[in-house]
Image (spheres, helix red, strand yellow):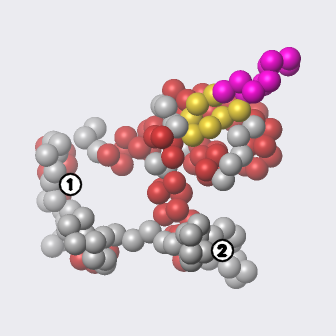
Amino acid sequence: MACSIAGVLEAIGDRWAVLILRDLSLGLSKYEDLRRSTGVTNATLSDRLKHLEENELVERRRYQLNPERYEYVQTAKGRDIILVIQALAQVGDKWAVSGNAGPPLKFVDRKTGHIVKLAMVDKETGQRVRAQDLLPQEGPGADELVRWRLTYFQK
């Protein structure tokens, strides 16, 4: 399928994988820490880590010989997923999915300490673009299915 969104979702896998990537981006790297943080079963965690490794989002590194133990770290490709994680957190905060106490996690600029948020910006000017001003158009990799989908977009 000629779809960047489908490709990223395929590489990630499912919600458990997103939570694993979230934790890796926060610095967790050991199997037991990932299991504890996510609450996922051992079988599911092992399966998702293998899937993420096969899709080059994480790398397994041995940190102990006897007994042999491994940690997991994000690759450059895996670090790109922070954009997805931040977007999900931003929407979840807007929807107050964690209740009225406020966001459980903030993303701040290390230099200023100011909270950051994702926004759509014009690639040329850097100016912010509102969601209602977005116009999807076919790109150079578009196929017939993409063109068909775009016929349904209300301009």
Q: Is label 1 in a helix, a strand or a loop?
A: helix
Q: Which numbered tag is attached to residue 149?
A: 1
Of pointers 2 and 1, the one earlier in the residue sequence: 2
Q: Magenta residues, as a range?
A: 61-70
Q: Is label 2 in a helix, a strand or a loop?
A: loop
Q: Can you tell which quarter of the image residue 70 is in?
A: top right
- Tell me: 144 left or right of 116: left
Q: Residue at x 68, y 79 (%)?
A: 102
Q: Main secondary structure of the magenta part?
A: strand
Q: Quadrant of the N terminus?
A: top left
Q: Quadrant of the C terminus?
A: bottom left
Mark 2 lies on residue = 103
The answer to whether residue 136 is magenta is no
The amino acid pointed to by label 1 is Arg
Residue 135: x and y in percent read 20, 68
Residue 81: x and y in percent read 49, 49
Residue 82: x and y in percent read 51, 54
- Tell me: 65 left or right of 72: right
- Of tags 2 and 1, the one toward the viewer is 2
Q: Residue at x 52, y 62 (%)?
A: 86
The answer to whether residue 68 is magenta is yes
Residue 143: x and y in percent read 15, 42
The amino acid pointed to by label 2 is Pro
